[in-house]
Image: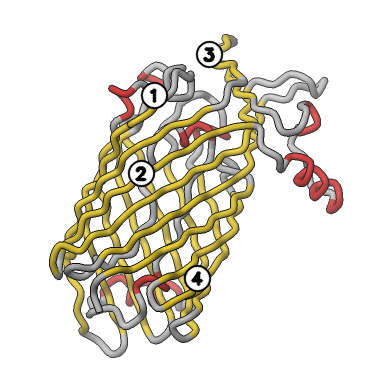
């Protein structure tokens, strides 16, 4: 008998109480999508379902780094490319979650990102060659270079080797919908947020959107379930799409659906292990699987408490199934709690 549907049903329908596990230890990891077509715009990032308590502030600094080599349309002569996105992406977030009262909080942050040549190409090439993995056309380019090339309808609509960077301010008021104990040892929390992002700096780059078009907003729903030392954190978002300069509006959807799902286990109050899946629907209609398919990555990581009010979160991510996201990524964040008890 397959018990998975029944277990999932229990997780979703049992409302529960105040979190029994330390909030900073079970927070989902910060996981940027470092695909070149996404980093020019701000991204809704993972947050715990629990809101900060009255007078409590969670300060967080997070950074993600990953390698991209996305190629499609290799011809028989192995030299012609229709789509190429070659870079390394870096993204950082500085944020504060400020507890307003027992049921609401306000999240404010600065989000910066960029694409450049990087340094990981020789390492990845050696890894692929050592284990006999396919190299995906990497030999066609010199290592550690930046290249963005897109053909559409036999015309070049994007071709540049310039680096890319952007800076956004993000805001999200959040309301706790419920947080109480009902059945046995299960605890459930649900909250709802209104997320928005305003560009502070967007360069004159074909992948970047104009300031007028790059404002983004959306609605987010968070859910957490805990039992004993085990926890589940999940969120879903519906957010507006920023239009890159190289695309016409008909090549883009207005909205994206984003999701993240984290399961894990606490080992006391000092260590936790986490497994996350994060993804987004693609807003693009370029005619390529590596841009038009929804993207998904999984992450293995954990969290260490370094002091009574400080935690260090880390993880390694890899794309899977869709092959429309960053090849590999490294993620680390530091969180500090002030106020409260």
Q: Answer with the quarter of the image where residue 225 lies.
A: bottom left
Name which residue lies at 47% across and 36% down.
39
Q: Circle 3 sits on which residue?
A: 157
Other residues around mark 3 within 10 Å, as few (<14) / some (14–19) / many (≥20): few
Other residues around mark 1 within 10 Å, as few (<14) / some (14–19) / many (≥20): many
Q: Pinpoint residue 183: horizontal percent, then vertical percent.
A: 25, 86
Badge 1 vs badge 2, beta-carbon distance below 8 Å: no
Which is nearer the eye, 306 or 43? Answer: 306
Could one spot residue 320 in this view of the protein? no
Name which residue lies at 44% across and 76% down.
307
Badge 4 vs badge 2, beta-carbon distance below 8 Å: no
Question: CA gap, disc 3 to disc 4?
Answer: 43 Å
Nearer mark to the viewer, of 3 and 4: 4
Q: Circle 2 sits on which residue?
A: 110
Q: Circle 1 sits on which residue?
A: 209
Q: Pinpoint residue 136: horizontal percent, then vertical percent.
A: 74, 37
Q: Earlier in the sequence, mark 3 or mark 1?
A: 3
Nearer mark to the viewer, of 1 and 4: 4
Name which residue lies at 75% across and 45% down.
124
Q: Earlier in the sequence, mark 2 or mark 3?
A: 2
Q: Circle 4 sits on which residue?
A: 303
Could one spot residue 240 in this view of the protein? yes
Direction top: furthest residue: 155
Badge 1 vs badge 4, beta-carbon distance below 8 Å: no
Is 297 left or right of 20, judged from the image as shown?
right
Nearer mark to the viewer, of 1 and 2: 2
Q: Earlier in the sequence, mark 3 or mark 4?
A: 3
Q: Pinpoint residue 6: horizontal percent, then vertical percent.
A: 38, 76
Q: Earlier in the sequence, mark 4 or mark 2?
A: 2
């Amino acid at each position: 008998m397959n018990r998975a549907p029944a277990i999932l049903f229990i997780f979703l329908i049992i409302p529960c109480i105040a979190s029994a596990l330390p909030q900073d230890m079970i927070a989902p990891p910060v996981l940027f999508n470092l695909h070149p077509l996404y980093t020019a715009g701000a991204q809704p990032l993972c947050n715990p379902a629990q809101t900060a308590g009255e007078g409590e502030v969670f300060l967080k600094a997070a950074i993600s780094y990953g390698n991209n080599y996305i190629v499609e349309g290799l011809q028989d002569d192995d030299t012609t490319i229709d789509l190429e996105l070659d870079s390394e992406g870096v993204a950082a977030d500085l944020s504060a979650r400020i507890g307003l009262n027992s049921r609401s909080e306000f999240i404010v942050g600065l989000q910066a990102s960029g694409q450049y040549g990087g340094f990981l190409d020789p390492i990845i090439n050696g890894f692929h060659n050592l284990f006999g993995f396919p190299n995906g056309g990497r030999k066609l380019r010199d290592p550690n270079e930046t290249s963005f090339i897109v053909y559409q309808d036999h015309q070049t609509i994007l071709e540049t080797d310039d680096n890319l960077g952007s800076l956004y301010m993000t805001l999200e008021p959040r309301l706790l919908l419920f947080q109480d104990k009902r059945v046995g040892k299960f605890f459930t929390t649900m909250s709802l947020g209104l997320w928005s992002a305003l560009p502070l700096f967007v360069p004159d780059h074909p992948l970047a959107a104009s300031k007028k078009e790059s404002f983004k907003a959306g609605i987010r729903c968070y859910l957490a379930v805990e039992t004993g030392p085990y926890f589940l954190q999940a969120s879903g978002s519906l957010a507006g799409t920023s239009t890159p300069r190289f695309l016409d509006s008909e090549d883009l959807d207005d909205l994206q659906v984003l999701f993240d799902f984290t399961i894990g286990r606490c080992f006391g109050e000092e260590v936790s292990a986490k497994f996350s899946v994060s993804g987004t629907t693609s807003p693009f209609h370029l005619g390529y699987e590596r841009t038009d398919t929804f993207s998904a990555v999984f992450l293995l990581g954990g969290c260490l408490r370094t002091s009574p009010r400080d935690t260090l979160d880390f993880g390694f991510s890899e794309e899977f199934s869709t092959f429309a996201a960053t090849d590999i990524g490294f993620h680390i964040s530091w969180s500090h709690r002030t106020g409260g008890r």
